[in-house]
Amino acid sequence: MKVLHIGNLKGGVDICIRNILTYLSSDFEFVVVNGADDRNKPYVRNGQEVRSYKISMFRPISFSKDIKALVQAVRILKKEKPDLVHCHSAKGGVIGRVAAFLTGYKSVYTPHAFSFLSSENKRNKTIYRFFEKITRLNSCLIGCSESERLLGIQQVGYPEEKAFAWTNSIPAIQVERIKRPEGIAAEEKYLVTIARPCYQKNPMFMVEVMKLLHEQLPDVKLYVLGADFYSPLLGDLKQRIEDRGLKDTIKVLPWISHDEAMGYLKYAQLYLSTSIYEGLPIAVLEAMALGKAVVASDVIGNRDCVKEGITGCLLPLDAKRFATGCRRLLDDEEQRCQMGRNAQEVFESDFLINNRIGELENIYEALFHKV
C-alpha cells in the first residue's frame, strides 16, 4: 500500500512523519511532499531514502503560490498514484485534500491543531473554520488526539464514521546516550520548554510566570528551545524579557539538534507548557518519556497527555497559578519525582509508538478497503 504524506513538515509534524516512516510495517510504501522552505534532512526508511518532492507550499496564505502548489501536487499524485494521501497541518490539509479530490484519490487529514485555533480574533477564527469545512470534501479525519477528533466532529462537520484518532506517539529515548549540555552545572535548577515564540505557545505569558517565580526562587532559570523557524514573536519575547529584568533568568536558544534538546530536558527539574492550544505536543511526550513532571495549560492537546495531580499540573492561564504550581513542585522533590515516575509509566502505556503503530496500520487498511 502506497501512502503519500503532504504538508509543511516542521517541528513536531516533521518528527511525527519520521516516526511513521520508521515504525510502520514493510507492507507500506511512502512518498513525502513538503514545502519549499522546509529545512528537513532526507526522509529515510529501512536505510533507504524515501522519494520526496518540494512544492511551492508556504505557511502564509499566497494565492499565486498556493495555486502553483496545488498544480504541482496534482502532477505528483498523477505520477505516484498513491493508494492514500495523508495530509498534515493546515496548508497541507487544503492543498492535499483538494489535489486528491481533483485526481480521484482517497485522502485523510491530520490537522496537528486545527487552523481556526490559531486565530487571535473572532472574525478570522470564523473564516478559518469555514475553510476547514469546505475543504473537507470527501476526506476522512485522523486526529492526533481524541480531543482533536471530537473537535473535527463538533466544529468541522466530520461524520463520526469518518473521524478517527491516532494519538501522537514517539519511541523510547535512549537516556544513557544523552549528555549534559555545556555550561549547565550539576547543581543548576531550571525549567525547560521547547516552543517557538508564536501565538500558540504563549511566550509573553511564560515571561510573566517566570517573573513571579523569580521573585520567590531567584536562582531558578528557564530555557526556551526552538526559537528559529517561524518565530514571529521572537523580537517581542526578547524585549519582554529585558523589560522584566530577566535576561539572566530566561535563556532563549535557537533551534538545536534533537540530542542537544534532550540534554536540556533530561537535566531539568520541570517541563513547562503555556500553550493556548495544541494538537498533542511531542515535546510534552518527550518530557514524560524522560520522567519529568509537567506544568501545563489546561487546553486541548495538553489535557490528552498530562494527568492533573498524577503526572503534573494542568492549570488555567493564570500567571499566579502557574508560578505557584511550579514553586510547589520545585520545593517538593519527593512529589516532583513521583510525578516524573508516573509520567514515564503513562508514556510507556499510552504513547510509546511501538505499542501504538498497529492502530495506524489498521486505520490505513480500513480506509484503503473502504468503498
Image (spheres, rainbow, N blue to C red):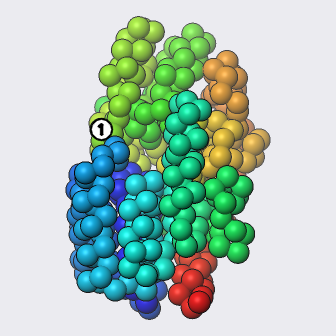
Residue at left offset 37%, top offset 20%: 236
Residue 274's place in the image compared with 116, above or below, is above
Q: Position of residue 314 (x, y in %)?
A: 70, 38
Residue 41, picture quadrant? bottom left
**Under tag 1, what secondary structure?**
loop
How many discs mark residues in the rendered view? Answer: 1
Q: Is residue 290 visible?
A: no
Residue 107 in the figure: left or right of residue 33: right
x and y percentages locating residue 255 in the rendered image: 30, 42
The one of 256 and 2 positioned closer to us in this rendering: 2
User: How many C-alpha atoms fall within 10 Å of the one at disc 1: few (<14), some, or many (≥20)?
Assistant: some
- Look at the image and tell me whether residue 234 can be seen: yes
Quadrant where the image shows the C terminus: bottom right
Q: Is residue 61 left or right of residue 276?
A: left
Q: Which residue is mark 1?
A: 228
Please state which of residues 254 and 14 is positioned toward the viewer in this rendering: 14
Tell me residue 49's x, y (percent).
Answer: 24, 77
Q: Quadrant of the N terminus?
A: bottom left
View extreme (right): residue: 309
Image height of 170 relative to 319, above or below:
below
Residue plotted at (42% across, 67% down): 98
Residue drawn at point x = 35 percent, y = 56 percent? 8
